[in-house]
Amino acid sequence: MASSKHTAYEEMIKGLWRDNPVFVQVLGMCPMLAVTNSAINAIAMGLATFFVLVGSSFLVSSLKQWIPKQVRISVYIVIIATFVTVVDYVLLAMVPAIHKELGAFIPLIVANCLILGRQEAFASKNTVKFAIMDAIGMAAGFLLAMFALGSVREILGEGKLFGISLFGDNFEPWVIMILPPGGFITLGLLLLLFNWMTERKQAFVAQVAEAERSKAS
Amino acid sequence: MNDLVWIFISALLVNNFVLAYFLGLCPFLGVSGKLETSFRLGLATTFVLIITALCSWFLNTYVLTHAPYLRLISFIVVIASTVQFIEMAIKKLSPALFQSLGIFLPLITTNCAILGLAIFATNRGYGLGEGLIFALGAGAGFTLAMVLMAGMREEAEIGNVPALVRGTAFNLIISGILSMAFMGFAGLFSST
Amino acid sequence: MKRKDPHLLLQSAPLLRQGMTTPAAMRDVWIALLPATLAGLWFFGLAALLVLLASIAGAVLTEWAFTPKEERAITLRDNSAALTGLLLGLTLPPALPLWMAFIGGAVAIGIGKLIWGGLGSNIFNPALVGRAFLLATFPIAMTTWTVQSGPVEFFTVHASNLATPFMQAPVIDTLSAATPLGQMKFEQTATPLMDLLIGNTSGSLGETSALLLLLGGIYLFLRRDLDWRIPVGIFATAAAFSAILYAVDAEKYPSALFTLFSGGMLLGALFMATDPVTSPVTPKGAWIFAIGVGFLVVLIRVFGGFPEGMMYAILLMNAATPLIDRWTQPRVFGRSQGKGSAK
Amino acid sequence: MSTQLPIQEKEPSSTTLVAALSIAGFLSGIIIIAVYLATFDTIAENKARELREAVFRVLPGVSQMQKLRFDGEELVVAPAEQKDDEDTIYGGYDDKGNFVGYAIASAGPGFQDTIRVLYGYQPAERKVVGMWILESRETPGLGDKIYKDAVFVANFDDLAIDPQIVTMKKGTKSAPNEIDAITGATISSKAVVRIINEGHAVWDKRLPRPGAEPRLAIVQPESEK
Amino acid sequence: MFPISLINKSFDHGVHPKHHKDQTADLSIQRVPFVSRYVMPLGQHIGAPAKPVVEVGQRVRRGELIAEAGGFISTALHSPVTGTVSDIGPHRYIDGNFKPAIEIEADPYATQQLPPKPSIDWQALSTEQFIEQVQQAGIVGMGGAAFPSHVKYSIPEGQQIENLLVNGAECEPYLTNDHRLMVERAETVIHGTEIVRQKLGAKHATIGVEMNKPDAIDILKQHIGERPIDIMALPVKYPQGAEKMLIKAVYDKEVPAGALPRDIGVAVNNVGTVVAIADYFDSGMPLIERIVTVSGPGVTEPANLIVPLGTPIREVLRFCGGLKESTREVIMGGPMMGMPIADLDAPILKGSSGILAFTEQETGRPQEYPCIRCGRCLEACPYFLNPSRLAKLGKARLFEEMRDDYNLMDCVECGACTFACPSSIPIVQHIRAAKDDLRQQKARSES
Amino acid sequence: MSEFLTAPAIMTGLGLFFGIILAVAYKLLKVEEDPRLAHTEELLPGTNCGACGEPGCLPFAQKLVVGEVQVSACTVASEDDVDEIADYLGVDAGEAEKRVARLRCAGGKAEAFQIAEYDGFESCRAAAVISGGGKGCSWGCLGLADCEVVCDFDAIYMNSNGLPVVDIDKCTACGDCVEACPKDLFELLPLSQKLYVQCNTPLAGESVTVLCSVGCDGCAKCAADAAPGLIEMKNELPLIHYESGLPVTPKATSRCPTDAIQWLEGGQFVEEESPSENRYAQLH
Ligand SMILES: Cc1cc2nc3c(=O)[nH]c(=O)nc-3n(C[C@H](O)[C@H](O)[C@H](O)COP(=O)(O)O)c2cc1C
Ligand SMILES: Cc1cc2nc3c(=O)[nH]c(=O)nc-3n(C[C@H](O)[C@H](O)[C@H](O)COP(=O)(O)O)c2cc1C
Ligand SMILES: Cc1cc2nc3c(=O)[nH]c(=O)nc-3n(C[C@H](O)[C@H](O)[C@H](O)COP(=O)(O)O)c2cc1C
Ligand SMILES: Cc1cc2nc3c(=O)[nH]c(=O)nc-3n(C[C@H](O)[C@H](O)[C@H](O)CO)c2cc1C
Ligand code: SF4
Ligand code: SF4
Ligand code: SF4
Ligand code: SF4
Ligand code: FES
């Protein structure tokens, strides 16, 4: 049982970095790239995903005994889809502008591999508490990544962050950042950065360990 | 420019599902390592897309007129179940076909391209014919992107890509360059 | 240690070498590009020179910065990074802000080459990756063409050239002029062939003088540095395709000659499509590649959104090169065909 | 979890499966409909406002509108709640209820993707009196000028439609049926014009002769304006 | 570029190295004096090693049988000197490994005369007897592969040799042993050719000689007489001497991959081989010596020598005034296909056509650059392979893929590709390594 | 309020419809599979995201069961899942007795000398085809690290003496190095077989010692010192008959003039007892 080895807290924070859904697990790439052309969209999408993920993790983990395995996927999907529809309508009612921006990608949260993945890999095997913790962690990690990408793209692409101009009016916008290629390339470079930092970290740890050993012997 | 042709070209090149719409990236990034696999995945996806076009058209015309708010959920349920059914059928009837194509079906049903197609087709109020062409174009476009990507990745695999870059970062960046190249098709047949 | 003989070397045969080296090949390209480059300077003045230098600097500095110290000596001496910079520079509009040119060079090498593992590993033509990036990033600056200053006002440098980094270039509508292709596409007016040949038209600073580019191409051919199939194939296909269109509607579509001598056609076909690294190695492959480029160029120019399609055509075929290569293995001696890993 | 496995291993009866699915369906159905109804009014409200704004923008001097539909031979008033389709347009009326003009939606390929345009048309003078982009994915900074660039949009405020609208290079507009293209976005500009021309080609035949336009069915209460 | 064959008749592709032959082309053949110690490896030919028929301490006479064929694809060994067998065991072979060999101490007082033997009346022999004789004479191909000639001559049922092709191309730079042989023993070459032609029942024989040996061509022409033999002057191009290329050049026929020349009715022999046969039938001398070109900038006095087999390379070089100080590498064979030698005590073998010594100048390896896919190697490869790809895969250790998808096994390691490569990538070495690895895997799976 | 009913009605309908279809299909179209496969797929996340590079979880499971891929390739499964699957498939819980790769050569730079200098592509295989790579002992390790390169578990590193050192903890006895070595120097042996001959030359006496200071010169002292019948001299090399069940003790190594036969506690060539230069001096 996964939870046996970790505390609920660990389950949560692992999503932020060690098992980050985007940088490590490479999941949910589509919304990640499609709606991160501005920080605000990124966050909106992130939050929507957050709600859906936590919600369905809660349901799935609490209903797991009653879901027969042959149809579990279908049932998960129904649950997820329900939450997504809810989000869809709520956003449409509350913030139509943003809803227009995110367009088709709100319904597409259903297909976000991350969500289904967590149900199957975690929620369906763990207690409600752990499931929720895990969901929060993962969703937060996703949100984090979305925000990172979104802000970079908005800053370079329009010289703004959350619509606030940063460099004065005659900043030359990097149009590509808002176009599809910009999404791919920027995320690629972000990942590169992520790998590099992780590597540094490991190298550092290794050095320390080395030092320890040499002291010991 | 004839509408059907435009729909096809647009889905195939100008607004390629993967490179311009960001749909189906998980398989695109994950499974494009082997040429052979990519090609077959492409075919399977095209197949499912066509199924999808049919399902969504059916739902739109016969079911959702009464309850538009069930669009999303009914799409996903119907498509998922149909494909799952087809998968079982293939597995039983032709193990060979299952190994070559069927095996991809679960991967495909849970990806955005499928649902995306359904939703776009509905938003644009495509009829059956347009829907099918759209699906065909999208599938072809997906396959094209997959195959090109796989070719490049196999080449880079035996090349000397720096260890730090290898993996998803690299795949994303070359996808970026590819999508930059595809920008060349922008405005195709719309300027004249 | 006890030993009877001088330490003998063990090297793999053959010990004889033809004498051609990779840096030499790159040097040849420099030489071949020299006339057209000088023409560019003559037509567009000091501004052009600055743009070239900026993009070369961007390329070389990036190469230097991201290669391990021990390899630097080699990778920089093979001239390829600087060549990339030069070729990129030649495809830029003369009035481009220098900082953009610099970024272009950096992207060309960084994303176009080093990511792939350096010289020889890249699949896309680095210079064109750089250009495509610039075009998509700064579309306006990249499509603002200047009339030729000519030798008279050689030393004029456009205000736009000196725009402060990351800031907009001042608009220079006054001396902006549509390229021959721009006029063709948006006003259906063809530029006289003579001007195209000599090169006193507006356009990228290295692409205008058709004759000098041809000269360079011939030099490369004689030095066996480029695969003649590629330019020949491109010209043939493009000419044929546009001839057909021309026959259909001479008002609307450009003539074959116009297609051949306008825009980046020559620079691209002779120096960029022929980049050995990014084009097929097999003879049959070269033909397919060339035909593909020729077709796409006309397709994009005539039916697409951009007045010029050379860059995109080459990049697209670059992407297909690995597949083309593996599907066109030469027929092996004594076999019915070369295997190659089909499918 | 291997401890759980045996539980899952045992074959559940088909009825269980069916039950599970149907129950899931049932519950989600309820949730969804609940949310739908809860948000229905606001959403409808938003939609209506958006539409009205668009129509009022392309038809200056209009204060009331109604949905019109071409039923095959003639243009008839259609109930507001009816779904829009390619046979639907809007009639604009001033506060006295006299007809001002039509707001016609038309779509076609742009530089990137399909552009949907709403334009105001005055059959009496055969003029386009306004243009509004409902939907486009044109390039930010270039193509998006077709709705961000006021000068360009102004082109369509008083534009003769006959023989058809023509795009000219910037600054060369002379005749009443010509517009100035946006430099750097010629294609999007031309696309907009083409889309309007095509829309007109379709509707010109369908519209009743000037003066015979459908009357305003219900005069809307002041508050609505 | 444009296939050369348009200009003059030859095979397609190939390269044009400087031929460096003038150093030795005019030096007539000398004998090296006998030395004290000889080593005769048992497996110096393709096929099964020979089986010793002498034991340590036994006295042997020059030309006496010391080992018999170890099977059909195998051949006999004869003592190159009169002396005593001092050891039978592992000795350093030219490939650097130790291989079983017979070591013979020469008898300093012996007159190294061949025991008088009646010349054999070859006309009287049936083909079978002829083949048997060739095997007993220990004759193998002198063209480099040292393939037992009798195997080549035993044509299976249903096949018929139409043409005998004698290989005087000598396309390897520096080497002039075949050249001198043709010039100095033209009559014997023609004679030997005739013997083999008749015994194989071939209608016609052609001697192919590259145009850079006009003197050889002339002399040979003079000696033909009535015999159905002709001399064909071939354009100078490497690897003209590779048998399949030679056949393409002379008969414009392609030997199918994996097939043998005989499958299209041709037998190919090196000029050395036919001379060895003629000598055996005329004077009864088995294959105990051969002609070796000693050349290259590293040797003091280049020469063409008749060397008894088994002579340590060191002794041969000493006879040529020893190595210059600047020497860095010594090669057995030609510069294109030859094998560098690790230990100068390794002996001259039946297949050793030359010994070359190279200095810094030749051995200073040019800086290796990454493959820029320039395609020059493809333009060079006479077998129309894709060396660029092969090298890349080899570096990545994808040996099976090289074999299955890129015809690795069709490569004859001629080195044309590597010669042409501007990035000086050791393509052939990658190819050899791949073949070696696959060979070893096969052997392992079998054992 | 008819609407309030349509939704649940339709959904239930759909649920029922597909529930039935799938249930029926499940019964009719059931295909018997390798239970291991079924269970492995069971253990996998089932995300079908393709992140592992395989087209979905089932294909990945198939490859797992036949051992073509590593569980860790799945980025989605948590560490615990990975362990669990690994345990289930017994990937590393292989044989009862742990085996490791042993190197049948101890002649590094310091002990065995080169007769010529290899100058070319840095690979043992490539060197081996160029006159054997120039090492005096043509059976010995070339030290160009092909084994290090091919070891997927980086269990091999080349020590300063130019010999590959196998990390016995990391080594999974996969045999890749055995395959890669052009000189056939690696063999997979149980860790428990401590008495080991680190030499592979069939030469004897002087002709060995001129080439390498730690080569076995076939003196047979070890055979004499070991339990009679345990060690047999074969091709001038000691052959240890572990299968004979005779007692195996370090004593056999006591009189070896070249340390060719070793008593291995753990790995080979552990720094402190790397054979030293001076022994070589003694011999010459
Ligand atoms: C990245 C990029 C995006 C572009 N987007 C548009 C666009 O959305 N709409 C458009 O009409 N032209 C667009 N263009 C410009 C067209 O390619 C074409 O050059 C322009 O329409 C020519 O107009 P002009 O002759 O007025 O400069 C874009 C160009 C680039 C490089
Ligand atoms: C295993 C093997 C078997 C061969 N069998 C025959 C044969 O039966 N008949 C023949 O004419 N040549 C045979 N050949 C000789 C080849 O045709 C070729 O002449 C020989 O390998 C030397 O050629 P080379 O010097 O071009 O490498 C054989 C060669 C090999 C390696
Ligand atoms: C690349 C290459 C070059 C060769 N060059 C010659 C040559 O120049 N002269 C020659 O006699 N044999 C040469 N050979 C050997 C011939 O292919 C062929 O094996 C030989 O002539 C057969 O005759 P043999 O069996 O009597 O040696 C060459 C082989 C190869 C693979
Ligand atoms: C004939 C020829 C053409 C070349 N063309 C280009 C080019 O278009 N762009 C470029 O970046 N490098 C070019 N190069 C240089 C080199 O191939 C290029 O830097 C590699 O693509 C870098 O891996 C060329 C080299 C040669 C010999
Ligand atoms: S000749 Fe050399 S550089 Fe050119 S393709 Fe062949 S291997 Fe590559
Ligand atoms: S060595 Fe092999 S690959 Fe290279 S040219 Fe010769 S035959 Fe072709
Ligand atoms: S053991 Fe074998 S593979 Fe490893 S370094 Fe030594 S020779 Fe090379
Ligand atoms: S390759 Fe395999 S056997 Fe060899 S050391 Fe590594 S893990 Fe052990
Ligand atoms: S998120 Fe789109 S396929 Fe996974």
Image (spheres, rainbow, N blue to C red):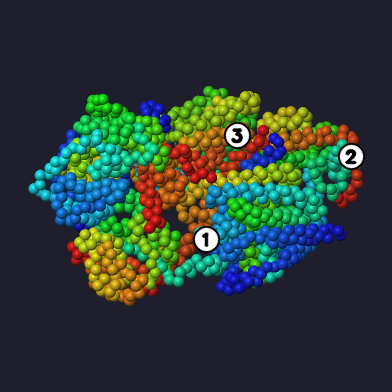
Q: CA distance from mark 1 to mark 3?
A: 49 Å
Q: Residues within 10 Å of mark 2 (few under 14, many from 20)?
A: some
> Element under label 1?
loop
> Element under label 3?
helix
Q: Is the residue at mark 2 in contact range of ligand 1, meaning its CB lies under 8 Å from it?
A: no
Q: CA distance from mark 1 to mark 2?
A: 75 Å
Amino acid residing under circle 2: Pro
Q: Is residue C261 visible?
A: yes
Q: Nearer the viewer, mark 1 or mark 3?
A: 1
Chain identifier of the residue bearing label 3 in the image: C
Q: What residue is pinned by disc 2?
A: D214
Q: Are marks 2 and 3 on the same chain?
A: no
Q: What residue is pinned by disc 1?
A: F66
Mark drawn on residue F158: none
Mark drawn on residue C299: 3
Whether residue C240 sits left or right of residue F195 in the image: it is right
